[in-house]
Image (tube, helix red, strand yellow):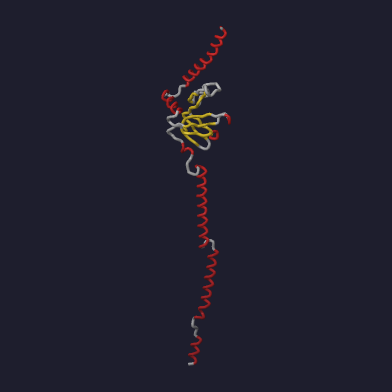
Amino acid sequence: MDFMNRNTRNVPTGRGDDEPTQRSALSVAGMVGKAKKNDPSGKFGGFFTVGTIALLISIAILIGALASYFAFGNNGTSEAEFVDKSAYQAVFVNVNGTNGGQVYFGHVQTVTDNYIDLTNVFYIQNSNSSSSSTNSSYTLVKLGCELHAPQDEMVINRGQVYFWENLKSNGQVAQKISEYYKNNPNGQNCSQSSASNSTSQASTSTQPSTSSSTKTTH
């Protein structure tokens, strides 16, 4: 009986042997947990990577919105969209410096930050040399028969433009332009224009000579 009791007391229950193993497992689990927290490619590292990408996308969207605002205004409309393609436009240009200017009429084809492209160009010419505004008369002249023979297109420096505007079809300028094209279905004839100008100049130049000769006879 004693031998049997002795053997029974010395037989390990297994609980004492498991305690070091459990402690070791807990230690390893703690070390793994710490390693995961410090690992930049782990759970927390992935979170910060997604946050960084989202931040970069937000910055890109903000930059695009600011670029659109400065390019087209706060309503997203460009200046070229105001051009009425069915009407004529008047472009007021600073030609002779700050003390003078010129207005050109025609069809605005293109508007950019650098230039305005104008075709079917007309301009107003004062046909009276008198300085009195009450006696002055104006003539609408078609561009093309000048001494330098320009083409029917004008590229105007945007920095020299005061402003431009669309013209009504029932206005005097628009009606005169329509009348011109009706009377000249084959286009501009500079030889006739030169002949008419020469005739008008001759008539004005002979008038003073006649009066002076009359005064001499008297």
How far across and down, in percent of the image, does residue 75 sit? 48, 44
Q: Vertical placement of 29 versus 208: above or below?
A: below
Between 57 and 91, which is closer to the camera in this rendering?
Answer: 91
How far across and down, in percent of the image, does residue 22 sit? 51, 75
Q: Vertical placement of 100 versus 21: above or below?
A: above
Residue at screen point 49% across, 36% down: 111
Q: Vertical placement of 45 versus 207: above or below?
A: below
Residue at screen point 49% across, 31% down: 90
Between 165 and 1, which is closer to the camera in this rendering?
Answer: 165
Residue farthest to the right, as pictured = 98
Between 205 and 109, which is closer to the camera in this rendering?
Answer: 205
Residue at screen point 42% across, 23% down: 183
How far across and down, in percent of the image, does residue 193 sit? 48, 20
Q: Quadrant of the C terminus?
A: top right
Tell me the quarter of the picture where residue 97 sits: top right
The total number of labels drawn is: 0
Between 188 and 15, which is closer to the camera in this rendering?
Answer: 188
Residue farthest to the top, as pictured = 217
Residue farthest to the bottom, as pictured = 1
How far across and down, in percent of the image, does residue 211 sit? 54, 11
